[in-house]
Image (tube, grey):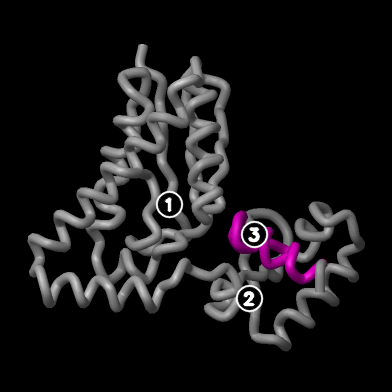
Amino acid sequence: MLSINRILYLLKTRGAQTAQSLAADLDMTAMGARQHLLLAEQQGLVESSMEKRSIGRPARVWRLTDAGHARFPERHADLTLTLIDGVKSVFGEQGLEALIEHREGQMREAYQLALANEGSLEAKINRLAQLRSAEGYMAEVEYDGQGQWLLIENHCPICTAAQQCQQFCRSELSLFSQCLGEQAKIERQEHLLSEGRRCVYLIQARV
């Protein structure tokens, strides 16, 4: 079961993979990886398809099913939706907007406090990723060596709430920009709610 969980994690964070690539990451044989994938398939957690490659024969790639994605749960999704509906009913759209602005302010204060002692832009980005991971976003950072970073969030723990009320993620660009300060320029490259597999932010050092 441990190997299946590791496979699900790799498919969640890296997208569709072949059995060979999973085997290399898990330090096992390709046959062993296939056996775990077939077991996960029987449980309805993964599915596969053949994909053409620029060189060589088509390869079988594996990806998570909806049930597989559900193994990475959202935080109190049903309760959140109930609260959203309740706020709308009692206080209207303006009340909901005020609540979201209050939440954003609290997050900004907490993030800025956590990043205050980080000197470099890279240190701030890595610390921000740690904060987001602690909140369930499965965040990671990639650096190209030329003053550009990707802040990648492989999971959204409030996705159901954000689908119901997109104001929850609407202000993230502004939030991140304020936390990283004038050192950085940031733009969203991929968005989970816009048919992306994950949320990805490109961060560039200002010169």
Q: Does the magenta stretch include residue 22?
A: no
Please state which amino acid type lies under the numbered disc 2: Ser
Numbered circle sitting on residue 150 = none
Disc 1 marks which residue?
A: 199
Describe residue 163's horizontal placement relative to residue 73 as left or right: left
Badge 3: how crowded within 10 Å, few (<14), some, or many (20+)? few
Disc 2 marks which residue?
A: 49
Circles 1 and 2 in contact, beta carbons < 8 Å: no
**Quadrant location of the N terminus?**
bottom right
Q: Measure how far apart labels 1 and 3 are at the Cα level.
A: 26 Å
Secondary structure at badge 2 equals strand
**Residues shaded magenta:** 3-18
Describe residue 100's horizontal placement relative to residue 31 as left or right: left
User: Against 104, is 145 above or below?
Assistant: above
Circles 1 and 3 in contact, beta carbons < 8 Å: no
Depth check, front residue: 117 or 58: 117
Mark 1 or mark 3, earlier in chain: 3
Q: In the displayed image of the protein, which residue is found farthest to the top?
A: 207
Q: Going 39% across and 65% down the picture, which residue do you hit?
A: 159
Q: Which of marks 1 and 3 is in front?
A: 1
Q: Measure how far apart labels 1 and 2 are at the Cα level.
A: 24 Å
Disc 3 marks which residue?
A: 53
Q: Going 49% across and 50% down the picture, which residue do you hit?
A: 153
Q: Where is residue 94 in the image (x, y as percent from the top left)?
A: 8, 60
Q: Which of marks 1 and 2 is in front?
A: 1
User: Against 120, is 33 above or below?
Assistant: below
